[in-house]
Image: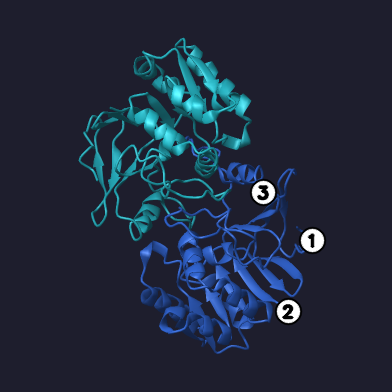
Chain colours: A blue, B cyan
Amino acid sequence: MKNILIASTSSLHGSSYLEYILDELAVFFKEANEILFIPYARPGGISYDDYTKVASGAFSKINKTVRGLHAYDDPKEAVKNAKAIFVGGGNTFVLTNQLYKNDLIGAIKQRVENGTPYLGTSAGSNICGLTIRTTNDMPIVYPPSFKALAFVPFNINPHYLDPDVNSKHMGETRETRIREFHYFNTQPVVGLREGSWLHVNNSSIILKGNLSARIFEYNKVPYEVVPNTELSGLK
Amino acid sequence: MKNILIASTSSLHGSSYLEYILDELAVFFKEANEILFIPYARPGGISYDDYTKVASGAFSKINKTVRGLHAYDDPKEAVKNAKAIFVGGGNTFVLTNQLYKNDLIGAIKQRVENGTPYLGTSAGSNICGLTIRTTNDMPIVYPPSFKALAFVPFNINPHYLDPDVNSKHMGETRETRIREFHYFNTQPVVGLREGSWLHVNNSSIILKGNLSARIFEYNKVPYEVVPNTELSGLK
């Protein structure tokens, strides 16, 4: 029993935090009045308190209370008692490192596999995959492992970006990076464009939002899937 | 006694492999007829043989022979005997992982600190810094450590890219990523634009090429330095 939203981004260009997905979240979190927010990814180095205020401001619009995990003396106990969980974006290495440091990987997995709704955006979505090996983030800290929550049987690449055909920059495109990933790893990768999300409902995994997603399977040519495609067969 | 070139990229847009820096390399490698090439970073998953052919093709223009490290039975011994070393670009995690796997970090450090000329491009430049924590690459493998060769007392960010003010993409800019780095690390970061390189000569570290570099120091506003600036004071 799983109920998970894996969103590419928290915000679309020109719109406020979570605004594009707020109607969806009102339904998704309908059974929960309070959401446990995990602010560990600290985008731009923001403090846990300030980051929690940002999340709180957005959720107040749909009448939800948000409490930051850092406000609890015993984070593991807080996860065990959570009625709903939101893991915000930022740096995936920082997030993963802190989850391991506080020994929360198992606790979150258990809680979410028992049906507690989980929302991830960006880094919070990266960790829903098998590993964080397809994050776009800079490895500013060294986590004890790249293994993640494995809520889905593949990896996530959030903020998926199509190659800029006019670019003169010699850095690798996203597609090249994911191709390199497949020289060393065999699981599929779902490239989620901004504004897209996956809805995991028990064994079903549906692509939502207005855009197609790009699927990278080992030894296959990458391909597009349209919204409402069932992705549970991908493994 | 050190003699090191730390180049942002191997190729500029529209020019062939190493072409922009070949005149410089003819001088830099003047004492060496044969260059030991370390192809471990495997850009785009290219084979060691094919990658070595690319390097070989470029160096043949300045009458240098190139031999890939993978062609030796004992890579550590090959490093110890090298007259010159070139570490090519690709994926920094893959490169670092393979260097640790073959126990080459110490051997390369020792050889280069004894005066053997070392050229790095892109990933091969990342590993010249204190750590690989400012790489732009995807963490497709998990190396035993992020510690690098520490030829310079700071970190390198190759392919440094200025923010695109017209972008609607919500991924972090390079500057934001490096600012996040400084929430967890205190060493300076040198953002090397494509076509720039650092020349390390004993204790001197000079910025070369036509472009300025962007310097990020802990708790300071980032700033630009022009070509021919001495950077050895940066630590």
Q: Is residue A169 visible?
A: no
Mark 3 packing: few (<14 Cα in 10 Å), some, or many (20+)?
Answer: some
Mark 1 packing: few (<14 Cα in 10 Å), some, or many (20+)?
Answer: few
| Mark nearer the viewer, 2 or 3 | 3
Whichever of labels 2 and 1 marks the residue nearer the N terminus, that label is 2
In this view, A2 is above or below A143: below
CB-based contact (under 8 Å), mark 1 and mark 3: no
Q: Say which residue label 3 marks.
A: A185
Please tell me which residue is depicted at 46% across the width and 80% down the height of the picture. Answer: A69
Q: Chain of mark 2?
A: A
- Horizontal and vertical percent for residue B77? 50, 26
Please tell me which residue is depicted at 39% across the width and 27% down the height of the picture. Answer: B118
Q: Which quadrant of the rendered structure holds the N terminus of chain B?
A: top left
Three-letter amino acid code at the position of disc 3: Asn
C-alpha gap between disc 2 and disc 1? 17 Å
Q: Say which residue label 1 marks.
A: A233
Q: What kind of element bears circle 3? A: loop
Q: Chain of mark 1?
A: A
Three-letter amino acid code at the position of disc 2: Met
Q: What kind of element bears circle 2? A: loop
In this view, A6 is above or below B153: below
Q: Say which residue label 2 marks.
A: A1
Tell me whether marks 1 and 3 sit on the same chain: yes
